[in-house]
Image (cartoon, grey):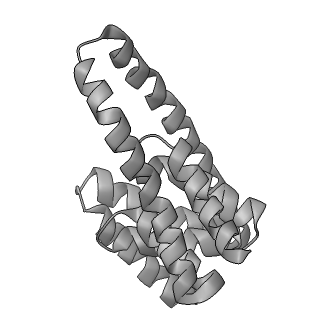
Amino acid sequence: MIYWDLFLAFFIPNIIGYGGGPAIIPLIEAEVVGRYGWMTSQAFAETLALGNALPSPIATKMAGYVGYEVAGVGGAFVAVAATVIPSLLLMLGALGLLYRHRDSPRVKRMSQWVRPVIAIMMAWLTLGFLLESFNTSGAIHTLIISIVAAVALVRFKTHPAFVVMGALVYGGVFLG
């Protein structure tokens, strides 16, 4: 039964999510943290931060880690398969259709309507992480990390992976 739950927890967000890894992270969090309770919000945030610091797609890394934590190697395999299968099937099915109608105004409008929804979902996830950080790490640490990260990203154009690694080091030194 745990394998079926793992499959559904990653299959459903990946089958209904549009826009790649960042767009489905809030959906995965809703399943892993909210529905099944396999992780806390804090553990999910830490897993996401670590996953962002490593190369390759974020959704498959998250699936592999959560699957392994929940049900070992078999769970990791099931969760990664559930993450990859929807994309593969939908891409194969929709590619021909979208290619034939790529100049259609309806297809262009559809893509434009999806972007704001993804932006709102990402903002909601960010707000949840911010509130969780205030509760667990305190306002001072949260503000320090936020301000340094914003300056590094915007002013110095630092790669996000280095910002995440810097935050991990800060957390290890001052919050560990």
Taking the spot 64% from the left edge, 66% from the top edge, the residue there is 133
Could you say which quadrant of the image residue 138 lies in?
Answer: bottom right
User: Is 150 placed above or below 106 here?
Assistant: below
Decide which of 78, 46 is in the foreground and name it.
78
Residue 163 locus on image (x, y percent): 35, 68
Taking the spot 65% from the left edge, 74% from the top edge, the residue there is 3
User: Which quadrant of the figure contains the C terminus?
Assistant: bottom right
Inspect this view and state whether residue 158 appears: yes
Could you say which quadrant of the image residue 32 lies in?
Answer: bottom right
Q: Number of callouts in the render? A: 0
Residue 118 locus on image (x, y percent): 50, 37
User: Is 174 placed above or below 117 here?
Assistant: below
Decide which of 94, 76 is in the foreground and name it.
94
Decide which of 154, 14 is in the foreground and name it.
14
Taking the spot 63% from the left edge, 84% from the top edge, the residue there is 71
Decide which of 61, 150 is in the foreground and name it.
61
Inspect this view and state whether residue 26 appears: no
Residue 134 locus on image (x, y percent): 68, 64
Taking the spot 74% from the left edge, 74% from the top edge, the residue there is 1
Q: Is residue 76 left or right of residue 9?
A: left
Q: Is residue 24 left or right of residue 61?
A: right
Of all residues, the one furthest to the top in this rendering is 105
User: Is 129 placed above or below 6 here?
Assistant: above
